[in-house]
Image (tube, grey):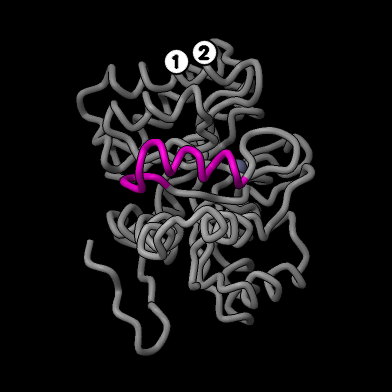
């Protein structure tokens, strides 16, 4: 089954991973800007990273027939440095018209600090000013519930935010309902050590249905599995989930959400119809 991984950090993966993803049915990836495995020292470090995301990775992906899309921001982990964050936010508009740039992300909270919240709101202002979609990182483990509530409150506190254009990632059983109820898209991140496993993700599909629900692998610097979405497809089939439901979660929903971004020029494989959005 063709699928799209809507949240995978390919800069942290080797080229062989692109080949494996292609063999497993991956036709497109979307790569949010995140931590690079180390804290960067200057705005130029981020400018180079954004060139990597908008120039180098699309070329590397294209060698395997995979279309590459991306999101730009300074991540919550490095947002503790408010001065640097503001320099990065001021520089981002240089890149917003580049092909494949879908919006601002992944912004969010890491340890739920006041500085992180300040920079979150400034990113939100940037997205509103430039009519960009937003991709959200919610904190992990013990910080997740409170951090998710804080993020949703900040988003819902601003009437200019269009919730149809916000994807909240790393949802789990205790956060998914509120994200969907408040009108956002929700992404389940499949991970070997934290976040969500494929069988827990199938539980959530059974409980909440496929509407506005996405699934991704993260594929980042930590222990993670870039082929986690095919694992989910397999688990869904084992559990008797209809093929149309699986296709909606792993293919049609990412296309529907991304299609709101003007730089999403996705080309379905030959002979396939783009799903109606
Ligand atoms: Zn991420």
The picture places residue 127, in percent across and down from the top left corner, at 35, 38
Asked if the stretch drawn in magenta spans residue 134, the answer is no
Which of 13/229 is in front? 229
Which type of secondary structure does the marked residue at label 1 adopt?
helix
Tell me if residue 257 comes above or below residue 74 in the rendering: below
Q: Is residue 193 above or below residue 178?
A: below
32 with respect to 24 (left or right): left
Task: Return the x and y of residue 74 as percentages of the image width and height.
Answer: 57, 36
Q: Are marks 1 and 2 in contact (CB under 8 Å)?
A: yes
Q: As drawn, which residue projects farthest toward the top?
A: 114
In the rendered image, the vertical position of residue 130 relative to residue 80, given as above or below: below
Q: For the residue labelled by badge 2, is the local secondary structure a helix, a strand or a loop?
A: helix
Mark 1 neighbour class, 10 Å CA radius: few under 14, some 14 to 19, many 20 or more? some
Q: Quadrant of the C terminus?
A: bottom left
In the orientation shown, which residue stands out farthest toward the bottom?
A: 271
Give the side of residue 5 with respect to residue 20, left or right.
left
Q: Confirm or reject: label 2 Cβ below 8 Å from ligand 1.
A: no
From the viewer's side, name the closer residue of 245 and 68: 245
Q: Position of residue 220 (x, y in %)?
A: 70, 48
Q: Quadrant of ligand 1?
A: top right
According to the image, label 2 marks what residue? 146
- Kindly indicate the quadrant of the structure image that contains residue 60: bottom right
At horizontal 35% and vertical 43% (from top left) the residue drawn is 209
Q: Which residue position holds label 1?
A: 150
Residue bounds of the magenta highlight = 198-213
Q: Nearer the viewer, residue 117 or 7?
A: 7
- Identify which residue, 111 or 196, lies in the foreground: 196
């Amino acid at each position: 089954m063709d699928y799209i991984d809507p949240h995978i950090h390919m800069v942290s993966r080797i080229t062989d991973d692109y080949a494996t993803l292609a063999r497993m049915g991956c036709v497109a990836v979307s790569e949010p800007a995140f931590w690079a495995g180390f804290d960067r020292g200057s705005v130029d470090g981020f400018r180079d990273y954004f060139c990597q995301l908008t120039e180098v990775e699309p070329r590397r992906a294209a060698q395997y027939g995979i279309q590459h899309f991306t999101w730009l921001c300074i991540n919550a982990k490095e947002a503790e440095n408010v001065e640097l964050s503001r320099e990065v936010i001021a520089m981002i508009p240089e890149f917003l018209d580049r092909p494949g740039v879908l919006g601002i992300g992944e912004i969010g909270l890491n340890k739920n600090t006041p500085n992180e919240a300040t920079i979150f709101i400034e990113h939100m202002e940037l997205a509103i000013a430039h009519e960009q979609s937003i991709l959200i990182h919610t904190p992990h483990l013990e910080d997740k519930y409170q951090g998710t509530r804080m993020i949703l409150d900040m988003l819902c506190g601003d009437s200019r935010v269009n919730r149809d254009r916000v994807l909240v990632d790393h949802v789990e059983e205790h956060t998914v309902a509120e994200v969907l109820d408040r009108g956002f898209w929700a992404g389940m991140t499949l991970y070997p050590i934290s976040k969500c496993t494929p069988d827990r993700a199938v539980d959530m599909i059974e409980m909440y249905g496929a509407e506005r629900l996405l699934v991704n692998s993260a594929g980042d610097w930590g222990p993670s599995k870039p082929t986690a979405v095919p694992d989910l497809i397999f688990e869904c089939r084992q559990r008797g989930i209809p093929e149309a439901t699986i296709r909606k979660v792993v293919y049609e929903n990412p296309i529907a959400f991304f299609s709101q971004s003007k730089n999403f020029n996705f080309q379905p494989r030959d002979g396939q119809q783009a799903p109606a959005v």
